[in-house]
Amino acid sequence: MATPAFDSPLLNRRGVLAAAAGTLLLAACGEQDQRPDAGPTASTTASGRHELVIGASLELTGRGAALGVLQQRAMEITVESLNLAGIPVGNLRRTVRLEIRDNRSDPQDAARQATELARRDQVHALVGGTSAETSMAIVEVAQKLQVPFVSLGAGDDIVLPLAERTYIYKLTPDAGDVARRMARLIESQRLRRVALLAADGLHGDSGVPAVRSALRAVDVDLTRTVRLPASGRSFTAAARQAAAGKPDGVIVWGTAPDSGTAAQELRRAAHSGPLFFDPGAVAEDTLTGPNATAVEGAYAIHPSCLAASTLTTTTTAELARRDFTFRYIQRHGSFSGFAPYGSDAVQLLASAARAASSVDRGRLRAYLQTQVTEGIAGGYAFAPIRHGGMERDSLGVYVVSQRAWTRYS
């Protein structure tokens, strides 16, 4: 079976960042980082097995389960694939072991679990937090205990300011990149007046200024900005407020399951124009049940993994996406575009361990920032000056057609 292509050379900004990251890493690490991971000291588990141990705090229940469960599935599929042969790390060949915890969509639980995974279970790295709030809770722990953390949440502040986030990396696209792609789409459809319905919390906090700036650049009027109430409360009043004044279109900046619920309420509020979603909406929940009619014809900006095709796969990365999608569907019946982030997190950590010849936390952190690769979800370009790795050229436009996300052109 094919595994994700994390070695594809890219002749663009990723190539420049790769060269810069490699130069800075060599200057910082010197000869000591050339030594292989040689033996059964801190890098061997209590059972005597040579492993790369990844701790994950995920939203397997609660409001975030629509996204968190997808990550568990994706991580398990990828670990099974990697463990067929193991990962060459220095003089050893290691297997990957996952320690997965359910944070119940609660930031306090996420912080507690991250602490336990780092201190008690001695994991080599942390992954998780599909919401900005759970990710930020893990950020504080990971930075304090100096454990590499790969966040699956959306929110630019997860990796900023960089001086205070040296162990933190984020896979989701930056809000500004998503907003600019969305604004160009809106402009191309000759819409002049748009309303924004943005999630409560850190995800919405990133989206609001990004959308405002992007629409201003294409001379589209943002008629009003309305924040959704905290998850679990009625969205009716917020949707009516956003639809008032009859905007040409409405942007819903949030995550599943809230995105689908907001779409329902906007239709009930008599908004019949187009809807535009950020990547957080792309989950099975958005397209199913009572949401299906409300979101038909809606647009989403999302990384390229939604466009996997069995007919046009020609590159190694495309073949890897097709293989991952096939295995995911074979096991779980349907595929969600949000799922690949978990797979990419595992692959990035495995690649860092291979490059570092070690599973030492400090070395993993240092070599994560050299990862300039093409993953399942899209392209990443980490560097010492950039810990939010999803590349803007990985983003595409999709439209909901007959309960499926279809590439729009």
Image (cartoon, grey):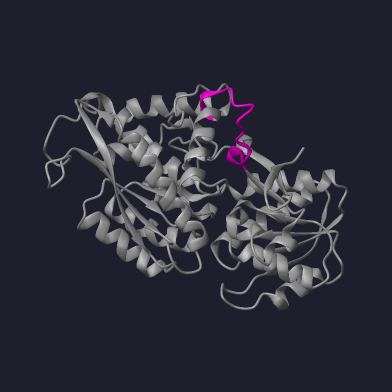
Q: Residue at x 62, y 56 (%)?
A: 281
In this orientation, does residue 230 appear? yes
Q: Is residue 369 above or below residue 9?
A: below
Q: Give the image quarter of residue 84.
A: top left
Q: Residue at x 87, y 54 (%)?
A: 192
Q: Nearer the viewer, residue 238 or 407?
A: 407
Q: How many marks?
A: 0
In this orientation, does residue 168 appear? no
361 inside magenta stretch:
no
Q: Is residue 197 above or below residue 23?
A: below
315 inside magenta stretch:
yes
Residue 407 vs residue 360: left or right? right
Q: Residue at x 67, y 47 (%)?
A: 405
Measured as percent of width and height from the top left, residue 291 is found at 68, 64
Check the picture and name the quadrant holding the C terminus: top right
Q: Residue at x 25, y 29 (%)?
A: 89
Check the picture and name the quadrant holding the N terminus: top left
Q: Give the image quarter of residue 308.
A: top right
Measured as percent of width and height from the top left, residue 69 is found at 45, 57
Measured as percent of width and height from the top left, residue 377 is found at 53, 40
Q: Which residues are magenta?
A: 303-317
Measured as percent of width and height from the top left, residue 262 is found at 68, 67
Residue 236 vs residue 109: left or right? right
